[in-house]
Image (cartoon, rainbow, N blue to C red):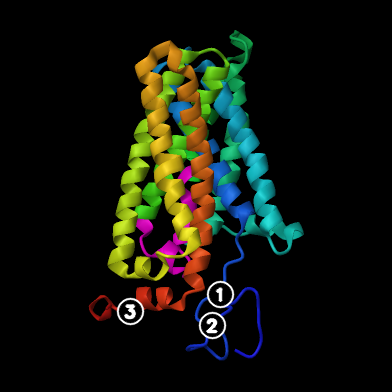
Amino acid sequence: MTRHDPHTLPDWQGETYYGQPGLKYPHWDWKVSGYIAVAGTAGAAQALATLGSLQDPDGMGPARRGARLMALTGTVAGAALLIADLKTPQRFHNMLRILRPTSPMSFGSYIFGGFGGASLLSALADLPASAGLRPLRLLGRAGQLVSGVGGAGVATYTAALVSATSNPYWAAAPRALGAQFAGVAVAMGAAALALWERLGGRDTTARRFEKVAAVATLAHLGASAALDERMQETGVHETIRDATPHRRLKVSTWLVAGALPLVGYAVGSAMGGRGRGAAIAGSCAVLAGGMLMRHGLLETGKAAVERPEAGFTLAQPAGRKP
């Protein structure tokens, strides 16, 4: 390499392609990890509130309104983060010019936009009950269902987005990564709704969401274990296990987003009304840990690119891996 480019491999002196490194250094930063966390939380919250409303429409009313607020806020904030990350932000509309089903970024943009629109439409469902407004209320209920389905897509499509790249850490285990993304998103969405209900004094509903968050936390820990196993099978884990971002990711996954929430929820459940503070701390740990996990994943992917042996190891046929 005859020149230094901050978006290429800084130290690699091995095989290149016409003077270029094997993989391009990813430019994604906190804006992308922030989008993944915000969109995942908003999408999962809307999906959970929609499912809850099918069983208990009246009891889930406040949670449904809270999820709608999260969805609309997440749509605005997420769009701002994505546009800010573009190389040419003023051309963001080009992302919606063509629908390409084979591109996670393309269909994800439409899912995200549709989710925001349906969430806004769902507000009509809370109009006063009167004969003249009944058609609008029905339209709002349809919007609620669409936003719930769209929320599930928003919460998980980003796993396909990152695993479809050539980055060895992101591409080594797409199924396990998808399961991890889904588990973390559901945990964060349930934790956000639990906090909303706690702040509103609706502790009974909050405990229901805390149980969902605890189960989702266990699910994402199981998916994380499967992800680690797959990384070891492909040989990628061996090349990046001592990287600082990878170590931080492990702390975020197993401690901040794993052990701490489970302990908080367990203490809160055991102490009943006196354990309200522990349960709130558990929900806060879920949200903080989920954000740290998203950012840690991107940073670990960058560390993998800086170690070309990770990419070469993943690219080797199964029978030729060391």
Query: What's the CA distance linking mark 2 and mark 3?
Result: 17 Å
Quadrant in the picture for the N terminus: bottom right
Query: What's the CA distance linking mark 1 and mark 2?
Result: 7 Å
Note whether residue 141 is visible: no
Q: Residue at x 64, y 58 (%)?
A: 95
Give the residue at mark 2.
Answer: 21
Relative vertical location of residue 283 with respect to residue 128 in this rendering, above or below: below
Label 3 neighbour load within 10 Å: few <14, some 14-19, many 20+? few
Decide whether residue 196 is among the magenta residues: no
Label 1 neighbour load within 10 Å: few <14, some 14-19, many 20+? some
Disc marking residue 24 = 1
Badge 1 vs badge 2, beta-carbon distance below 8 Å: yes
Q: Residue at x 34, y 63 (%)?
A: 231
Question: Which residues make up the magenta segment?
Answer: 155-175
Q: Secondary structure at mark 1?
A: loop
Residue 1 vs residue 317, the one in the foreground:
1
The outermost residue toward the right is 90
Residue 131 vs residue 85, the one in the foreground:
85
N-terminal-most mark, 1 or 3? 1
The outermost residue toward the left is 319
Label 2 neighbour load within 10 Å: few <14, some 14-19, many 20+? many
Q: Residue at x 56, y 91 (%)?
A: 18
Inspect the image, locate mark 2, and give the three-letter code of the amino acid beneath it: Pro
Magenta: main secondary structure equals helix
Tell me where residue 124 appears, x and y as whole percent. 61, 22
Give the residue at mark 3.
Answer: 316
Q: Secondary structure at mark 2?
A: loop
Note whether residue 219 is visible: yes
Quadrant in the picture for the C terminus: bottom left
